[in-house]
Every structure is written in C-alpha cells, then in structure tokens.
Image (cartoon, helix red, strand yellow):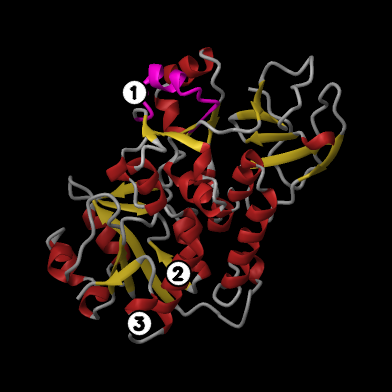
Amino acid sequence: VCTAYAADKDNAKTPVDIPGLTYDHSMELSYAEEFSVDYYNDGYALITIDQEGQFLVVPEGKKAPEGLDPDIAVLQQPINNIYLVATSAMDLFRAIDGIDSIRLSGTQENGWYIQEAKDAMEQKKIIYAGKYNAPDYELILNEGCDLAIESTMIHHNPEVQEKLEQFGIPVMVERSSYEADPLGRMEWIKLYGVLTGKEQLAEELFEKEIKELENVSVQADEGQEHSDQTNQGKTVAFFYITSKGSANVRKPGDYVAKMIQMAGGTYVPQNAEEEENALSTMNMEMEAFYDQAKDADYIIYNSTIDGELTTMDEFLAKSPLLADFKAVKEGHVWCTGKNLFQETMGLGNMIQDIHRMLTEETPDEGQMHYIHQLK
C-alpha cells in the first residue's frame, strides 16, 4: 500500500506527483488525522487513508491519468452504487443527503437505527448484500458496485477484500473509529463530501456542529477553553458488563473518554491502558473495575451491545457489586440509547448530554438525545 506522506501532521507534506495533473491545494482538517485529501487541477482529488491506501476521485466526464501508480485506486464519479459495510459512515451520508449513492448494505434493515437507512431498505432503494465476512459477490457485481466502504473488521477476512478487488471493485477501509478526537470522527463527513461531490455542504455541516459545541466543551488540549465551562470536578464511568461478567471499559485515550472530558468530566478508570493493542476497549475483571470505579460520581451504562435498560433493577441485575457504587447510591446512573454509535453526526449532542448530566440537578429528559437516567 503506498501512502502519500507520513501521517505526522506537523511535517511539511509533499503531495503525490500524479502524471498529467498539477497539485493545487490540500483539504483543511481541524481534527481528523486518519485521512487527508489533496486537490489537483480540473477537480481531481486524491484521498489518502492512513495505513489503508489511496484513491483518486476522477470527475464525471474525465479520465484517470495514464501512468497512474497502480497502488492508487480510481474512483470515477458519479459514484452511485456503493456497498456500505462501515455502519458509522451511514449517518455522514445521511447528513449530506447522499444516501442515494448507496445501493448495497452490509447491515440488514432491522440492524439500522438511522430512519433514512431503514426507509431506503424498506423501499428496496438499498438492498442487503451480506455482511463484511460473507458478501454476496454475485449480487454486488450484478448491481454494478463501484466502491465498497468497509470498517477495519475486514482485516479479519483479508480474502474478502482481495476478492472484491479482483472483481475490480475498489475497497476503502474506513478508519474514523481510530480518531482519538470525537470531532475527528465527525470530520470524516468531508471525505464523503468529496466522494459525492458535496464538499461545501459537508464543510458547512461540520462547522455548524463545531459552533454548537463551543457553548459546551472544555478544550482538553493545552488547557484552552472553548468557553467559560470548566471541569466540573466529577468523575464518569462508561462501561458495560459482558456475558462473562467482566466490565468492558474504554481506554483513557479513546474518543468516548475524550467526549466526557470535553463535557467537563473526568473519565474513570484512568489506568485501563495495560493492553497494548489497537482496540479502544478492554475487559477488566469485575473486582478490579470495582476498585477503580466504585467512587465514580456518574455511571453511563453502554447498552449498545445487549439492549437498552429502562430500570435500575435491570442494571443492578448485571452484577451484585454494582449496588455498592457511589453513583448508584446517589441515583446518578444513566444508560445510552442503541443509536449512539451509528449516529456519528450526533457526537456533539452526546457531549451536550453529558454536560447537562454533570451540571443540572434534574436534566430535562426531553432535551437529552442519547442517554436516559435509570430510575
């Protein structure tokens, strides 16, 4: 896989030399570090995804330049028959009114929490083409698929990517989940803006989200504050209990931990860093988790895996140790909705929800988007 330049943002980048094209400028990115876009004359754009590869977006009516590096996949606009496997991208397509570009889904209709995706599947505008490790190749070819957008799960089944590429279908592996900053995840909307020819709309929507957040968030980096909000001095545990009875927690560098920080809280447990792997979560034995998180001021229970909880009794049934947690005794237990991780553009609302939870005595449930209090 050829990569245009080091991902280190501070280094001066040398744009890729593409025969017959003249480099013009690069996309300005405020938070995203996992991709970049370089623009060339006549509307050509080179997308580079860190560790995953490069894609030359060729404008409608134009041709790919001769002598192009064979490692650079060509995406000919209009791109209309996408096989979308990376669920977090759907909300970004929805936001820019680009769901029409998607023809095939790696998720079945009942697996979507995004209404527009559900509707499109019901109306057969989008059809199910098999999950990431078992795609329906015949259907995908018959539908004239011109791009597969996969999550990094595809690396567990590299033979699928190879086969799609053998059939001439470019495979773009989406790395937004590796963005440490939640706003970086949201900024991937600009990449989908490039694919669909809606860069300006994507840019405007992203800027709007950032503006709305300026009222809330404490900028965690360099002590800069977006506004007069400061750390509330409250700790927040975010976890779920696995079927084996351990606590699945986020690592402190994860974007969920960062959202809690931006909302004015402090994520616990802070030392969940022992495992050196790319995953953003890890499992802790319940006793170890209890020792580190029992004094957390707030608990947000992550219900996206095993279903939403509505009552405190359902929560306490997960583990006998939970009853001893400070947040349980003080009635500060919240639960996420199932749609949190599909609605990538809602991360700003999630930060606002956490901020309300931390600062208001009895937050108005009607103003909450992704979390609800367990009674």
- The amino acid at mark 1 is Ala
Q: Of residues 254 and 157, which is closer to you in this image? A: 157
Q: Residue at position x 50%, y 25% from top?
A: 145
Of the numbered discs 2 and 1, the one sitting upstream in the chain is 1
Whole-number angstrom distance, CA of label 1 to CA of label 3: 44 Å
Specify whether 19 is left or right of 280. Answer: right
The region drawn magenta spans 131-149
Which SS class for mark 3? Answer: loop
Q: Residues within 10 Å of mark 1 (few under 14, many from 20)?
A: few
Measuring from the top left, give residue 265's x and y in whole percent: 45, 72
> Residue placed at 55% from the left, 26% from the top?
146
Q: CA distance from mark 2 to mark 1?
A: 41 Å
Look at label 2 and name its amino acid.
Answer: Thr
Residue 301 spot, x, y in % from top left: 29, 62
Residue, x 58% and y 30% (percent of image)? 52
- Mark 3 = which residue? 364
Secondary structure under tag 2 reads strand
374 or 288: nearer the eye? 374
| Residue marked by disc 1 | 134
Where is residue 353? Give x, y as percent.
42, 72
